[in-house]
Amino acid sequence: MILFVFLLFLSLQNIYFYNIGLAPFPILSLSIIFIFFFINNKSLKKRDYVYIVILYTFIFFSAIVNSWRPIGNNTLFTIIGYLSGPLFLLLSINFLRLFSINNLYKTLSYILIFHLFFFYTQLIFYYLFNTELNFLYSITGEESRNFDGLRFRPSGIINEPMVYSNIILIFLYFRYTLSNKFEIIDYLALISMQLSFSLFGMLASVVIFLFYKINLFRVLLSICLVMIIFYQFEELIILDRLINILDDGSFQGRYLLTFNSIVSDSSILFFGTGFFYDVPNQDIKGLSLFLQIITIFGLPISLLFIFPFFLKKRSYILSIIFILFFLISDLRFQQYLTWFYFSLLLNFNSFYVTKIYSKV
């Protein structure tokens, strides 16, 4: 039960209560794993602590190197999230090792069922009964961004389709790493990413489906699925966005302008800007995760930071695809869900699954 609550709170990290000016669920998830750290931390190894020390060294090095820059206007909670991220990673690793693979796998099924229930309920009510169910508004008073001016894009209890796709992608990766297979619920999750009409979610779900036990049938089915989505639901809107991707406003803001700004300034490319300081160019927003990491640390440290994520993976090609989509997502570096995913990449590789979890 406590594992389900922890994972559920993480998945609800974007639910913000404006009346109290706070998103409480990440704080509650941190509280849970912090308590369990004091109850049992024997699963942590020396290398886990060493890695965290290295991360904090990177953080403070980037702050010192960029101390000549003017201080930015980050909120207190943003700074706390940034500084406590490596700690959350360490506590997550310890917490997850307290549970068997079977327990983790079943609990992840319940998390997916929770989100898929709200997603498909919202989808069915809109298309069958012409009724928009805004679950988030009922909870916080915030309107979900389900319309983009052209079509309805369901996201369940989450505030927008791309954020929904990010969350589903993380828990799909977790389940796949534990089992090395997809089941019915995983396919329903992939289909929901298609039906969210998030360009990111649609591309990620098709590529993941294509490379999972790749064969001619899956290639043809993936092509048919994309064509059905394009023609029946989107009237070539997404296809037009792909053809003109360099002119797409979302792509420019999330990737292109940031990339151009970084490579045009050697000080940012090699040393970043640190997290606490203003960036000298408004184009540098770090809206995609990896570009945000480069913006903070610079390219050399960023490569050292992500290098361990690619080691000792099961079903290597598909695992790498999951990781690459994670790095181009718009998850925030200071969010606990992001650091939780980092903990999965470090904790659930072939070494840990076969050694630490061999009791299952």
Image (cartoon, rainbow, N blue to C red):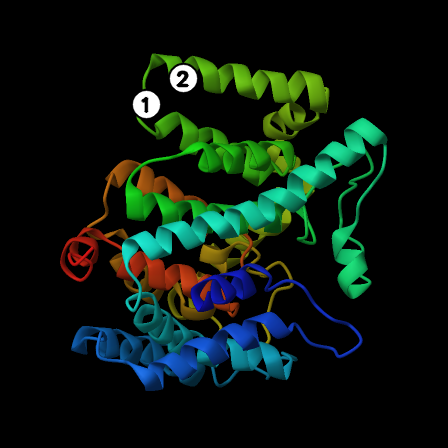
Q: Report whether 127 appears left or right of 98.
A: right
Q: CA distance from mark 2 to mark 1?
A: 7 Å
In the image, which disc is placed on residue 18? Answer: none
Q: Residue at x 63, y 43 (%)?
A: 117
Q: Secondary structure at mark 2?
A: helix
**Residue under the image location 47 percent in, 20 percent down:** 222
Q: Dot 2 corresponds to which residue? A: 219
Outermost residue to the front: 1
Tell me which amino acid carries mark 2.
Val
User: What residue is pinned by disc 1?
Assistant: 214
Q: Position of residue 358 (x, y in %)?
A: 15, 56
User: Mark 1: which amino acid?
Assistant: Ile
The image quarter containing residue 52 is bottom left
Q: In the visual, does 190 lie left or right of 318? A: right
Does residue 268 appear to the left or right of 315 in the view shown? Answer: right
Q: Is disc 2 in contact with disc 1, using a CB cutoff of under 8 Å?
A: yes
The residue located at (59%, 48%) in the rendering is 115
The mark nearer the N terminus, 2 or 1, is 1
Q: Nearer the viewer, residue 165 or 282?
A: 165
